[in-house]
Amino acid sequence: MINYYKYLPTSDEDESWGLHVLNAGCNRIPENEIYPSVQHPAHHYFTWGKGRVLDEYQIIYIAKGDGVFESESCRKSAIKEGTVLLLFPGEWHRFKPGLEKGWDEYWVGFRGPIMENLVKQKFFHPRKPILHLGVLENIINLMLEIIDKTKNEKTGYQPMVAGIVMHLLGQIHTLAKQKNFKAEDLTETIINKARIIFRTNIDQDIAIENVAKELNVSYAWFRKVFKSYSGIAPHQYLLQLKIEKAKILLADHSKQIKEIAFDLNFKSSFYFSKLFKEKTGLSPEQFRKMKID
């Protein structure tokens, strides 16, 4: 995971849409690290001792690790991986990762009458800010899509990102309701965790054996079950993720092909180009030119 955050200006037109996004990002907090970092923007910075009050809603997803959360309407509670934290405007709160594990967090901040109506209708409530949904690839995908759309701030992007936030809210509400009636399947949980490990470490050289070890299962079992469940071997799944990410990076013409290969931890730009052509039928240069044309 590459740490990222962005705070977004909004126009009157953006705000009249009904929901507008103020910020988005992701962070990997290692074990024994001070939280929040001293580099955290001043207008959102807080300490555990004082907590903070925001003038916005936030969705925070803890994809890995553990910690604690407390708010004005919710007593101090333990947080585990796969948990959504909902922050409400005007509501005092504080949270932090555990020192022994740290955590991976994704977040998006937003405002608007659409969310205010959802809270008024009690779809979401300050007394229930902690929703344990499990480690879910679709939640990560929506968070990553929000982050990608905010990076370039292309004209008209705000309604599109607001739509993704609405999709995310719908997913959270539906999954929270389903959670009350369905026990989580262990195999599905392990596969979802593996997918998230792959996605959040796409820029690393990941050994599949180490992923199995992290999930406390044997390599042989993991490889067999992953392929049976998803229809693709774990190594090929990871390569496909890297190729899809490469397509996004190739849209940035300031980046050289060898930089993209390096960013995605391929052993050489030649290997990256060869693999890209095998998977897409085009070389990275041809793919980039096609996008321009």
Image (spheres, rainbow, N blue to C red):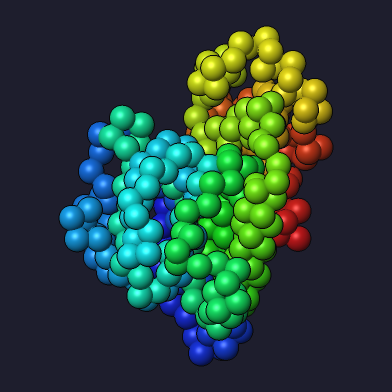
Residue shown at 34%/55% (left/top)?
75
Residue 27 vs 218, above or below: the answer is below
Residue 23 shows in the view: no
| Observer-nearest of 4 and 165 | 165
Quarter of the rendering containing residue 124:
bottom right
Residue 119 shows in the view: yes
The percent coordinates of residue 182 (x first, y second) are 70, 42
| Observer-nearest of 188 and 176 | 176
Residue shown at 78%/38% (left/top)?
280
Residue 283 is left or right of residue 210, and the answer is right
Residue 150 is left or right of residue 94, and the answer is right
Residue 75 vs 119, above or below: the answer is above
Residue 196 vs 271, above or below: the answer is below
The percent coordinates of residue 254 (x first, y second) are 52, 53
The percent coordinates of residue 159 (x first, y second) are 62, 76
Residue shown at 27%/65% (left/top)?
52
Residue 65 is left or right of residue 131, and the answer is left
Quarter of the rendering containing residue 101:
top left
Quarter holding the C terminus? bottom right
Give the total of numbered labels.
0
Residue shown at 18%/55% (left/top)?
49
The percent coordinates of residue 17 (x first, y second) are 61, 84
Residue 201 vs 13, above or below: the answer is above
